[in-house]
Amino acid sequence: MFVKTIVRLATRGLLQAFLLSLSSVAWGQSCTFSISNVEFSNINTAANVTYNTTATLTANCTGLASRTVRVCPNIGSGTGGTANGNPRYMLSAGYQLAYNLFSNSNRTIVWGSHVWPYSYNPPTININLNSSGTGSTSRTIYARVFAGQQLVPAGTYTSAFSGGHTLISYAYSTVGNCQTIGGMNGTTTPFIVNASNQPNCTVSASTLDFGAAGSLTGVLDAVGSISLTCTLSTPYVISLNGGNDGAIDPTLRKMSKGAEKITYGLYRDTARLLPWGATTGLNTVAGTGTGAAQSLQVYGRVPSQTTPSAGIYTDTIVVTVTY
């Protein structure tokens, strides 16, 4: 009898443990998550403007009917890293592009993590389960690449989020807040942040004005300027066309008043020895973008010639930047 009693007690204990395990599976909550990639597509840091985009966190949960599941979507620094949580960075060949993720559309509240050392926390997401014990929701992740990054060169910048970078934990709301929930039911949801910083140039030019002259028996000189802003490390070539008359020789362009003409030339140097035209490698100007505005001087000269009738003589030059 003594031996039989021990066997019965042992059997009962195993049965109870098995039943408790079944109970935990039947009444616990279970969630799945996905986060879409954060795609900034093409940007131009030389333009010194912000770029915004969004991504979506989707959650689907099951559990006890009419209960609330509290989700704590911790998003860390990503492989691009961060110094203090704001900004985060994307990387390309050792260069950093500053951006961040936010929980509000104004992009003022950083979407952070309860498990990183910085003060920025994630939003709390509550999912109300229906009478069948299921529920789902989605939350927009707002992203921004910051202005003021003109010294960032062209390239494809990325930061990957996986593993502990996206630790999403959850529990019934009765457990408490996200600090209390901690890493309960922690799961990871990978996504990528990327941006393509395209080589880009913008250009503007001032009017080159030779002023007023009573005669053209002497040389008239004037100086104009071209302002050029190109993405850092972007090579460029600047050419000037032949004007309204389509001059082939850059020193024989024409200003016109009706049928009357005044011959003039445009040059790359103060001595007016290097014409500025449109033949690459011969009379154009080459350089490399710095990310900031660069100013180039255009030197004009009206050589001595027969003086036409009085009036205003003009020409239009097209500035072309190839990069």
Image (cartoon, rainbow, N blue to C red):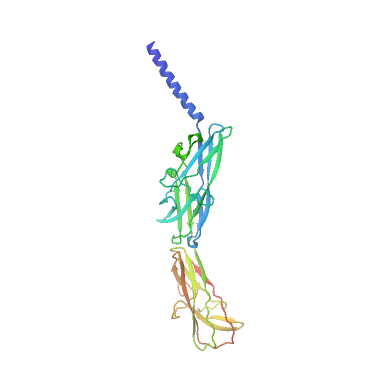
Choose between 302 and 20: the one closer to the eye. Answer: 20
Residue visible at 48% across and 68% down? 228
User: In this rendering, is residue 87 above or below 229?
Assistant: above
Q: Position of residue 230 (x, y in %)?
A: 47, 65
Seen in the picture, residue 33 relative to 239 is either above or below; the reply is: above
| Image point (49%, 29%), residue name | 25
Q: Nearer the viewer, residue 48 or 58?
A: 48
Find residue 262 and report its image quarter: bottom right
Q: Which quadrant of the rendered structure holds the N terminus?
A: top left
Query: Residue farthest to the top?
Result: 1
The answer to whether residue 19 of the structure is visible from this angle is yes
Q: Position of residue 298 (x, y in %)?
A: 48, 76
Is residue 284 in sight in this rendering?
Answer: no
Left or right: 4 with respect to 68?
Answer: left
Vertical placement of 184 versus 262: above or below?
above
Residue 48 pos. (x, y %)? 49, 61
Q: Can you give x and y, in whole percent of width and height, for residue 12 in the image?
A: 44, 19
Q: Nearer the viewer, residue 7 or 141?
A: 141
Residue at far right of view = 258
